[in-house]
Amino acid sequence: MNCNGEQYYPDKKRGLAAIGYYVIINYSKAVTPISVSQPSGSVNPTSAQPLPKVPDVWIGSTIGSYKIESLIGEGGTGYVLKGRFSNQEVAIKVLKIDKDPDLFANLAREAFNLAELSKHPNVVKIYAINVDKLVIDKILNGDTLLYVKSPPYIVMELMKGSIHDLMMKDEFFYSQAWRRTVIRAIKKIAEALYYMHSNGYVHMDVKPQNILIDKVPSEPAELDNVNFKLGDMGGAVRVGEKVIQFTPTYAPPEVFLYKAMPVFDVFSLGMTLYVLLTRKIDRPDLQEMNEAFNDLSKVKVARDKLNAWSQNLDEVIRKAILLQATVKDFMNLQY
């Protein structure tokens, strides 16, 4: 998309939307393409060769000590790359530079604690966080060459996909094992959130895309062998601090008004459970959630719509939508 001379790229380039299932596509401003091998300083635009674009520029190159092999995917806040250190495969999330600088500051401040939290067996392990404030400041001031050469990144355990990927495949979603699989996954994520909350952190972006899987089953009978972990710890913040990352589809309206609270994660977990069981994103306040970024009066409208809509939902999901549930309610779910 071209807007006012700037190019914007979608976070999703292809996919399927079943009847009653909505997809929100976020656009991010393109990073000026610069070659890794290009020396710093001015470039004569008439003589310069065509240069690779981010994230393509990293494929086959190195970031830190990691050899980058391929692009796994792209989201609203970063690019996820497959990398290798020695014989160890890893996932590397390179953060986009057109986001809130508070995200970088939070990562720099909380890097050690987030890595410690990832030691929980139901959380994707974080091996390293590389966020240098001096480098970030220079990148945010327009040094795109530095972004290509030394981007902010998080090195994580390499997973094989997400429960969202499984949900979108009819052979799994319509199988007798699906509900049991979803409940098992939600219980594991609830345990991870309980651990995070007990240590004073809120994840702030619980959704099916962030419930990651360690293997890809070939048939429904193999679903019981899949392990689930909570991913994308990069947006986690301390309880009571400013919210720096959330997905409107899975967040409560109150994220626009208040600082981070554990109940926000509980709401998101309830909404995630609803979507996984129904394969629908039909909460009635999606328009108000998107409008609330510029008009906080929409928050009350969104809340009123959710309250009415929730009355026909399963009890634990309804309580989560009403901000009346706890993470233990999900830990105690029955198959």
Image (cartoon, rainbow, N blue to C red):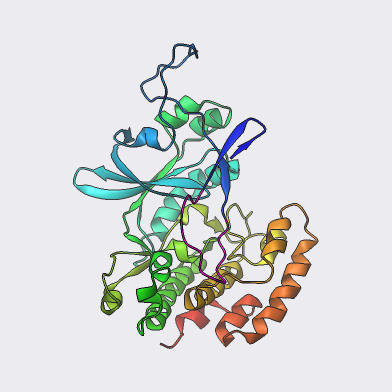
Q: Which residues are magenta?
A: 11-24
- What residue sits 31% from the left and 54% below the top? 158
Q: Is residue 265 above or below residue 139?
A: below
Which percent across, then down, holds residue 310? Answer: 65, 81
- What residue sits 60% from the left and 43% below the top? 100
Is the C terminus in the top left, top right, bottom left or bottom right quadrant?
bottom left
Secondary structure character of the magenta stretch overall = loop
Is the N terminus in the top left, top right, bottom left or bottom right quadrant?
top right
Which percent across, then down, holds residue 79? Answer: 44, 45
Q: Between residues 171 and 113, which one lies in front from this camera angle?
A: 171
Which percent across, then down, holds residue 326? Answer: 56, 78
| 5 inside magenta stretch | no
Q: Between residues 123 and 208, which one lies in front from this camera angle?
A: 208
Residue 258: tell me if it is visible.
Answer: no
Is 263 positioned to the left or the right of 38 in the image?
right
Q: Between residues 163 and 176, which one lies in front from this camera angle?
A: 176
